């Protein structure tokens, strides 16, 4: 007959791998959220830069104003797009934490997740 200790060892190993997988998945989801927040920051900076460039072009090269207005409008479209991606990433992290929180033993990762979650909510509040 099989030794019950071996079965428990294998079950424990499978459980440990599941915990590692859950933590890894959470890290990936947090990195997606972090990267998307950086994208929003970059999009806001780009809108500001393009608006300043438009003002300079209006003064110096009036023929290129319409082209620069198109560039500015494209930059402005990225802000709501990034905001929607942050909302999606936030929901994804929230849903995953609700589902898998008990499987993750890394308290530092969970604290980091909560901190990033709060930061993302603040960023979204600024957009309103």
Image: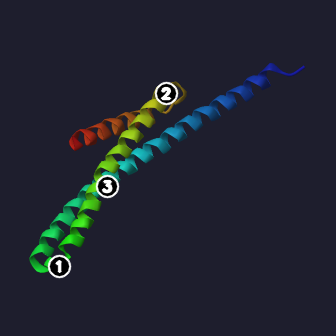
In the rendered structure, the answer to whether residue 31 lies left or right of residue 12 reads left
Return the x and y of residue 27 as percentages of the image width and height: 48, 42
Q: Within 10 Å of the Cα at label 1, are there few (<14), some (14-19), or many (20+) other Cα atoms?
A: few
Cα separation, mark 2 vs mark 3, equals: 33 Å
In the rendered structure, the answer to whether residue 23 lies left or right of residue 11 reads left
Q: Nearer the viewer, mark 2 or mark 3?
A: 3
Quadrant assignment, res 11: top right
Q: Within 10 Å of the Cα at label 2, are there few (<14), some (14-19), or many (20+) other Cα atoms?
A: some
Q: Within 10 Å of the Cα at label 3, are there few (<14), some (14-19), or many (20+) other Cα atoms?
A: some
What residue is drawn where x is 49% and y is 38%? 26
Q: Nearer the viewer, mark 1 or mark 3?
A: 1
Is the Cβ of the residue at disc 2 closer than 8 Å to that at disc 3?
Answer: no
Is the Cβ of the residue at disc 2 closer than 8 Å to that at disc 1?
Answer: no
Q: Nearer the viewer, mark 2 or mark 1?
A: 1
Q: Quadrant of the C terminus?
A: top left
Q: Which residue is mark 3?
A: 78
Q: Which mark is residue 119?
A: none
N-terminal-most mark, 1 or 3 = 1
Q: In the image shown, does 65 or 8 lie closer to the viewer? A: 65
Q: Which residue is mark 2?
A: 101
Q: Say which element carries label 3.
A: helix
């Amino acid at each position: 007959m099989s030794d019950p200790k071996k079965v428990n060892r294998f079950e424990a190993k499978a459980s440990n791998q599941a915990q590692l997988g859950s933590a890894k998945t959470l890290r990936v989801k947090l990195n997606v959220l972090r990267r998307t927040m950086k994208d929003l920051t970059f999009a806001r900076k780009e809108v500001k830069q393009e608006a300043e460039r438009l003002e300079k072009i209006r003064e110096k090269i009036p023929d290129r104003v319409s082209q620069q207005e198109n560039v500015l409008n494209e930059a402005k479209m990225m802000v709501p797009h990034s905001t929607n991606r942050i909302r999606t990433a936030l929901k994804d992290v929230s849903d995953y934490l609700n589902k898998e929180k008990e499987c993750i033993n890394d308290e530092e990762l969970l604290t980091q997740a909560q901190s990033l979650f709060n930061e993302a909510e603040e960023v979204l509040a600024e957009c309103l």
